[in-house]
Amino acid sequence: MRKLSRLSFIVAVAGTIAVTGAGISAPSASGGPLVSFNPVAGNQGFTVFVEGNATLSSSSAGGPVALGGNLTLGSNTFNVATQTAGTFTAAGDAEPAGLLINGTVNWAGSGNGNGNGAISIGSSGYVKVGNLTGSTVAQSGTSATHVVPAGQGYSSQKQIADTVFQPTASVSQAGLIGFASAFSTFSSDSAGLGSCSGTVVLDNQNGMPLPATLPANTSAYLTLNSGVQNVLNVTAANLANISTLQFQNTPSASTPLIINISTTGSGNTFTWSPPNFNGLQTANAAYILWNFPTATALTLSGSSAIPGTVYAPGSTVTETDQNGINGGVIAAAYTQGVSSGGGQVTPELFATTVQSCASTAPTLTSPSSLTWAATDTGSDQSAVDAVAGDQQLTAADNSGTGAGWHITVSATTFTTTHGSRRGAPARRRWRSSSRCPSLF
């Protein structure tokens, strides 16, 4: 954001003139370049990244997990960071955070009432708990560190267990990640991507476009445009009716696929049993983004693994799919598994850049009013509004680049209240303008 100051009004006359006036025309701006970005970049490398509370019941997350709220454990042992603990390492730590809880551990609600419930953190990852109220860090020499309910010991059935020794002082740390800021950006990016027009469509086996309303058990075929961003727009109802999705060619870093799912027709609540996905390799999942820009409640069920990142920053996501997700999760709140069910979330995070279709033109805020009065002698004189706040425009660069904007403003025509030119009274109209500097 830049402020363009000193809105002055030049009067090019000889002699003495007194002027008063008010008003400025609305500023105009030229457009700017589209910006490429990775929509999941704010997740700090966590495979599951949740703004609020999460329940982890079954079965596992191959990468690290972070949540901005409180954690509830299920009745089974949930494994975190089985493949990688990621790259987010707090200052002074020897290992990255495999599990980051910005709030507390909800021991009372954990274990489904049977006294069990545990989380095991693999890949030498550390645990971070923002608020240890109700918890204690249990150590046994230099053995793996445990976090357990307050008043219980190292061998408590309810526990969060590292696989390495972690210094006690390292466990309790809050505010390591700005979740609110990250999710504000996610929500904006999700809406921007959701506004993109479709560039690909679903076909039948003969290469002809499928009808606007899909019947149940539809076999759909998808051909991507190579070397560009691909966008598939589909309603939740149509997506639910696809039994098989055949990829005729595969997504890649240069050929990413954004699938925008409209849930407005179902009240932004959607239960989805994914179809069989054919024609994909595991590595292709890093270039597929399932975008749910308006969903508030999303349940993933069935037994077919979802390839790609589930991008639902405004939604509570419940993952009970038996084969899980090959990708990642961005969600407002999250449950994985119930008493059973819920497969592994394999870390194949979205790994390329895309472009939003939201407007990137800068917004300009001009003064609500301008008034000035002056008596000047000579040519090329100026009159400046006496109110400091009226002496500037505020330009907010929405593109995130800061470079390339050109902004021009001009004042309205005003009239002298009285004046003289070589002693002769006159009533004249003058036009004044001011060109603000380009924003670079």
Image (spheres, rainbow, N blue to C red):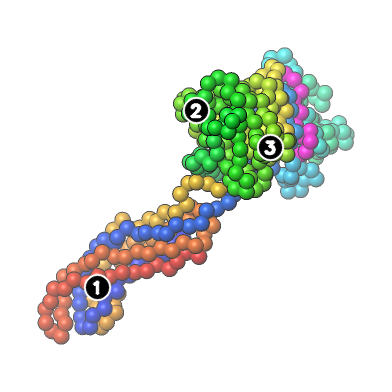
N-terminal of the pair, mark 3 or mark 2, is 2
Q: Secondary structure at mark 1?
A: strand
Of 311 and 231, nearer the camera is: 231
Can see residue 291? no
Q: Which is more foreground, mark 2 or mark 1? A: 2
103 sits left or right of 78 in the view: left
Circles 1, 3 touching at the beta carbon (< 8 Å): no
Percent across and percent down for residue 96 are 76, 42
Q: Amino acid at mark 2?
A: Pro
- In this rendering, the answer to whether 269 lies above or below 12 is above
Can see residue 209? yes
Q: Secondary structure at mark 2?
A: loop
Q: Which is more foreground, mark 3 or mark 2? A: 2
Give the residue at mark 2. 211
Circles 2, 1 touching at the beta carbon (< 8 Å): no
Q: Amino acid at mark 3?
A: Ala
Q: Which residues are magenta?
A: 69-85
Give the residue at mark 3. 285
Of 45 and 416, nearer the camera is: 45
**Which residue is situated farthest in the left direction here?**
425
Give the residue at mark 1. 374
